[in-house]
Image: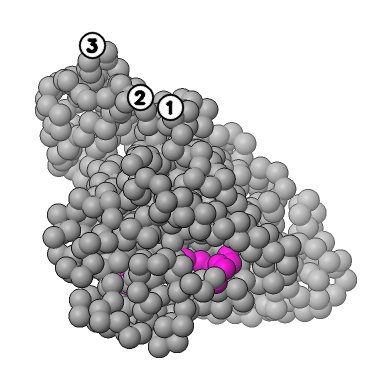
């Protein structure tokens, strides 16, 4: 057999096998190895050690007892990296993924009978199983599933492992993501993981886990494929089994000269279709159904692959030999069988914005013992209690309601109460004009506002740190929260049925953090009676959201660091039950302040006079001249001034008469030092401010 050594290439499995996608992380990793020859050399050395061990292990098996005989169990922890979308798959789908994975490894799949007769004699029960961990690395009771909100679910490369990574000598870390680097999944081999332990584990797209939910039976084969790589198997055509950093695509004739280092798998070009009569490389028939092919009917391992994987589990390379030891199975909670550990539950929805309430299906997700009986309490629901495993409860009355569950198992019990778990917003409409400056605890009275956070790390709250008017505003204190957060603020329903046109105005202040690399986004959205689809009327992102320079500390705005925005409300939304909301998305950044909400025909005109969209300045940054374009709602006398960040006026002009519509002036800023300044436009009691930079 040709001894070709793998280097740190992404092991990939594409849903478009006839047009394999090549991940950019592959090139990044290759560049890293080329720039770090010591790492590359270490990988080669580890792989040589493991290959030598595998050959010796296979000889011992051939000369001694029959292959196998001992069951190896591998503890698994799932890290679901999500952005509050369908990639946040259910516990049920995860367990189904484990089920089909184990059936593939143990030769018990229902479709095992479909294996071609030519390969049934070597179709192996690998005697390897995967079990959900029930303890975390500190020995605490755990569900075996972590859920972490992060934008990294969209990239799905090795960076997801920086979010959470349990000790790889104790657990197989599986990361469920939205997009696995553009592929179905990827993994590194034991030699690679031994060199860079922080990369050890499997990343897999949510739609390739199990046979239910977002996945299906066909795509479920990807999980076993990646676990084969985790246990030192190569693609059946030898793909990625290369010493010089090159990639072997499936289906090319030159693959006949390559090998997967397993004796009983025929050399093949590799297949991306399920043709059981496919033949290549001089074979009468290729093993198209092998788990390490790309055929999507790849449901079997051979006896030779079994030996190679079990050798990896007996080798100290990447500490695979510790995973299945009795001590580790106890430490990870796999054995002995854990009893009732904690009560827990999920609901298919927890928030109702519309006026008619709705039905909620609750699911008991307590772990880990068998449940004998349950007792639910639903204050505010149509049923105050239930003894059903999955009760359906209808909520009609506005408010926020607790839900409690007590679980009984083998003489033990556990209780969990989730406070304010179900929320139904009030449907009592306010009249217009509507305004609020967030004085007098607006989030706790009159059901006027409702804050809804998708995470527990940050939320809307009243504060007296800063205000555009009065003494209070609202803020999301998202200073360096180390995860993705989505914070929604719902306004009350408003009766706009008598209006022919309407505007929504608000003031905000925001600065990014110099310590955070990610941007933030603020959306203003409207709906009719809280319908499912909200219409986005304004989106402020990145630098367009910032009203001040990035900060090195939690942001507190000055008087000049507040902006106002005015949004036109479409005529189709001018009806009773009109709703609006603010949605702030961030990932470890800084504070957002919100103040002075107004809904009226003239909202924002008298107070702010001109919105940011009515003023443009250029060039920005500048060094000599500043051109100012501004659009007036009516003819007016306007004066201009330039103010520094301390509020000191440096340049000012007398009032001058300007006409209705667009006007232009030019200001000489040649004498100003480099830095940040504010241009102020004033007319009587009206003023507007725009930020610019001198370089």
Quadrant of the drawing holding the C terminus:
bottom right
Q: Residue furthest front?
A: 63
Mark number displayed over residue 330: 1
Dot placed on the residue nearer the N-terminal end, 2 or 1: 1
Residue at 36 percent across and 40 percent down: it is: 70
Measure the C-alpha gap from mark 2 to mark 1. 6 Å
In the rendered view, would you say 378 is above or below 268? above
The numbered disc on residue 411 is 3
* Left or right: residue 22 compared with residue 407: right
Q: Residue at left 46%, top 50%?
A: 60
Q: Are marks 1 and 3 in contact (CB under 8 Å)?
A: no
Q: Is residue 318 magenta?
A: no
Which residue corresponds to the image point at 32% horizontal and 26% vertical from the top-left? 337
Whether residue 520 appears in this view of the structure is no
Q: Nearer the viewer, mark 1 or mark 3?
A: 1
For residue 336, the mark is 2
Residue 332 percent location from the top left of the image: 44, 31
Crowd tier of the residue under label 1, counting other residues whose Cα lies within 10 Å: few below 14, some 14–19, many 20 or above: some
Give the magenta range: 4-17
Q: Residue furthest bottom?
A: 253
């Amino acid at each position: 057999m040709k001894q070709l050594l793998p280097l740190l290439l992404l092991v990939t499995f594409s849903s478009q096998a006839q047009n394999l996608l090549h991940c950019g992380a592959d090139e990044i990793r290759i560049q890293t190895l080329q720039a770090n020859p010591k790492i590359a050399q270490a990988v080669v050395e580890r792989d040589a050690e493991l290959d030598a061990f595998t050959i010796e292990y296979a000889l011992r098996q051939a000369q001694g007892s029959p292959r196998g005989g001992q069951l190896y169990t591998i503890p698994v922890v799932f890290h679901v990296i999500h952005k509050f979308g369908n990639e946040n798959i259910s516990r049920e789908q995860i367990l189904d993924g484990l089920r089909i994975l184990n059936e593939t490894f143990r030769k018990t799949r229902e479709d095992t009978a479909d294996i071609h007769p030519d390969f049934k004699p070597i179709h192996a029960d690998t005697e390897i199983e995967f079990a959900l961990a029930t303890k975390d690395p500190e020995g605490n009771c755990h569900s075996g599933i972590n859920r972490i909100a992060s934008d990294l679910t969209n990239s799905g490369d090795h960076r997801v492992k920086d979010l959470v990574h349990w000790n790889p000598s104790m657990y197989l870390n599986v990361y469920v993501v939205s997009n696995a680097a553009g592929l179905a999944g990827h993994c590194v081999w034991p030699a690679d993981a031994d060199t860079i332990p922080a990369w050890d584990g499997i990343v897999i797209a949510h739609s390739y886990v199990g046979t239910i939910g977002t996945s299906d039976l066909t795509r479920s084969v990807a999980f076993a494929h990646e676990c084969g790589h985790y246990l030192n198997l190569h693609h059946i055509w030898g793909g990625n089994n290369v010493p010089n950093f090159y990639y072997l695509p499936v289906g090319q004739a030159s693959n006949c000269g390559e090998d997967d280092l397993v004796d009983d798998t025929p050399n093949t070009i590799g297949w991306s279709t399920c043709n059981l009569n496919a033949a290549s490389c001089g074979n009468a028939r290729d093993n198209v159904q092998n788990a390490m092919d790309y055929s999507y009917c790849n449901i079997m391992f051979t006896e030779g692959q079994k030996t190679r994987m079990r050798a990896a589990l007996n080798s100290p390379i990447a500490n695979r030999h510790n995973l299945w030891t009795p001590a580790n199975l106890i430490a990870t909670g796999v054995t002995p069988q854990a009893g009732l550990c904690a009560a827990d539950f999920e609901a298919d929805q927890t928030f109702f914005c519309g006026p008619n309430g709705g039905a909620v299906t609750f699911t008991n997700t307590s772990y880990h013992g068998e449940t004998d009986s349950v007792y639910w309490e639903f204050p505010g629901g149509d049923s105050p209690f239930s003894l059903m495993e999955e009760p359906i409860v209808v909520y009609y009355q506005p408010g926020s309601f607790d839900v409690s569950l007590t679980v009984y198992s083998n003489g033990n019990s556990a209780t969990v109460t989730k406070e304010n778990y179900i929320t139904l917003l009030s449907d009592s409409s306010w009249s217009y004009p509507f305004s609020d400056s967030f004085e007098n605890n607006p989030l706790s009275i009159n059901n006027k506002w409702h804050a809804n956070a998708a995470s527990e790390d940050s939320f809307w709250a009243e504060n007296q740190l800063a205000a555009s008017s009065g003494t209070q505003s609202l803020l999301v204190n998202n200073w360096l929260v180390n995860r993705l957060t989505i914070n929604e603020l719902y306004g009350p329903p408003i009766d706009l049925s008598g209006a022919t046109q309407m505007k929504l105005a608000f003031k905000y202040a925001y600065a990014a953090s110099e310590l955070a690399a990610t941007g933030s986004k603020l959306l203003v959205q409207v709906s009719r009676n809280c319908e499912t689809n909200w219409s986005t009327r304004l989106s402020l992102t990145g630098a367009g959201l910032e009203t001040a320079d990035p900060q090195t500390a939690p942001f507190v705005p000055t008087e000049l660091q507040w902006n106002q925005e005015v949004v036109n409300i479409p005529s189709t939304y001018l009806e009773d039950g009109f709703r609006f909301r603010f949605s702030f998305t961030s990932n470890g950044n800084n504070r957002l302040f919100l103040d002075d909400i107004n809904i009226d025909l003239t909202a924002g005109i008298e107070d702010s006079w001109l919105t940011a969209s009515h003023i443009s300045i250029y060039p920005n940054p500048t060094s000599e001249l500043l051109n100012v374009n501004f659009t007036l709602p009516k003819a007016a006398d306007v004066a201009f001034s330039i103010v520094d960040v301390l509020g000191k006026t440096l340049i000012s002009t007398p009032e001058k008469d300007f006409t209705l519509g667009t006007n232009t002036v030019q200001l000489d800023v040649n004498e100003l030092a480099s830095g940040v300044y504010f241009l102020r436009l004033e007319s009587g009691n009206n003023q507007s401010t725009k930020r610019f930079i001198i370089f």
